Amino acid sequence: MKKILIITLLAIGLTLPAQAAIISYDVLSGDSGVSYSHFNTSFSRIYDEFNGSISSANILNDSLDEADFADAINPRVRTDENIGDYTYTGMLPVTSTDLTSNISAGTSYVNGYRIVTDATSKTYTASVDTWVYIDQNGAFQYSEVATGAAQPTTPSNSLLLAQVVCDGDNITSVVDKRTTTPPGLRIYQDLILGAVISRDITTATTINIGKGTIDFGSGIALRRNTLTADIVFTSTGRGGLDTGSLAQGYYAIWAVPDDANATNYEGVASTSFSATSLSITGERLIGWCYAPTSSAISPDSVGGYKGLGSSQPNISRFQDKTTVSTTSTTYTDLLEIKFYSSGRPVLINSDLAVNNSGASGMYAVISVDTIGYDSSERGFFTGGGSATVPAGTMSPSAIINVGKGQHSIKIRWRVAGNTGYIFGKTVTVQEL
């Protein structure tokens, strides 16, 4: 009977999974070693370990795998939910003078699995675009499409890495499509880094959204662009106006998640500052611009929306070298800047090069939405001057809480007598 108990005890210990390998017992050399003391000691070692005494000391190193954890405590599930799929380093193909090149060694996270690969050689098919992915099992996946064709659907359980473009016998270019920032990592909600908005230098009907990172909120989280996204006001839909055609007035600049992939963002312009007519899930107001005519957007009146703590600048600047004159002894408009404020205080600075034809003073003041700010008034006095050469400067400035919305900011001026001249003017409006 004792032999049967001991054999049964050892069988239980040896058939238990990970713990069986490290539960020790005293080896018997004969029947004389069988005793109640030996039985109790051996049984207690198993009993204690499986009834509350399991610790790192009695679990083999590297013996637990992801499948050993319930989802409620699984670190892989937690990592996937809170960080998302991204490439930590490497895993990028390179160009080549033939059709074969290496995908660099690297590390990616796919569905919470940490995937590590060595440098991997790949021979590509000539005259097609090959889209490269890494899957959760650590295998590279490839989708081939015609040259210049639309991006294919990402295979299941895979992460996009690159687009490889080949001609008849070379790898001509590699477009980096990696997500290198954890898309689910919430640094803080409403994050915008970069994504600076400006009017295109050469095309007066195009707005550029610079590369950057935008948080689109729950379910979408971070999107990152490594290239400029354009909004073309002569087209409609994503990358254009939400509806209609360019007309004089203010436009809201919206960022929307790119529908072609899970990595990038696009832009849409709308006359509405509350929502686009496209009703795209996650759309986010990120800036504004002003079109003085139906054929051009002002290069001066364009900026970022800072209402949620964006790092984008919201600055308008007017500069002109044209000489103007006045004999008016009451304030008249010198210049006007259109500006959209998120509701923060606005700093207005100006610099006017002036002179007066006689021994009279000149004055300039800031006006916002027809309200004059007398405290900003600056004067200049001369004993008789030139109509062609400036003799000094006037620099009215102010910090004003103008309120959220569209604003008309003006510099107004007058003379005490004779003729006043302004030879150049620079005005900057900046939301703080």
Image (tube, helix red, strand yellow):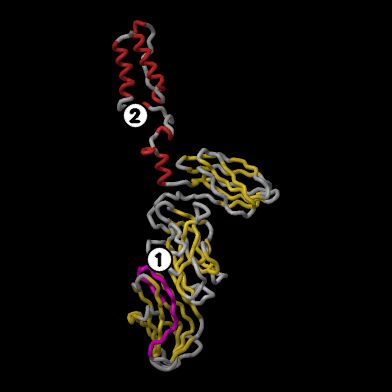
Residue sitting nearer the eye, 375 or 208: 208
**What is the x, y in percent for residue 207?**
51, 67
Q: Amino acid at mark 1?
A: Ser
Q: Secondary structure at mark 2?
A: loop
Q: Residue at x 49, y 90 (%)?
A: 387
Residue sitting nearer the eye, 336 or 327: 336
Quadrant in the picture for the N terminus: top left
Q: Amino acid at mark 2?
A: Ser
Crowding around mark 2 (Cα neighbors within 10 Å: few <14, some 14 to 19, many 20+) is few
Quadrant in the picture for the C terminus: bottom left
What secondary structure prevails in the magenta region? Answer: strand
**What is the x, y in percent for residue 198?**
49, 67
Determine whether, in the image, residue 102 is placed left or right of residue 225.
right
Q: Which residue is the site of mark 2?
A: 55
Q: Which residue is the site of mark 1?
A: 274
For marks 1 and 2 on the same chain, the one whose residue lies earlier in the sequence: 2
Q: Secondary structure at mark 1?
A: loop
| Extent of the magenta region | 330-349
Q: How far apart, in angstroms, are the residues tagged by discs 1 and 2? A: 56 Å
Residue at far right of view: 168
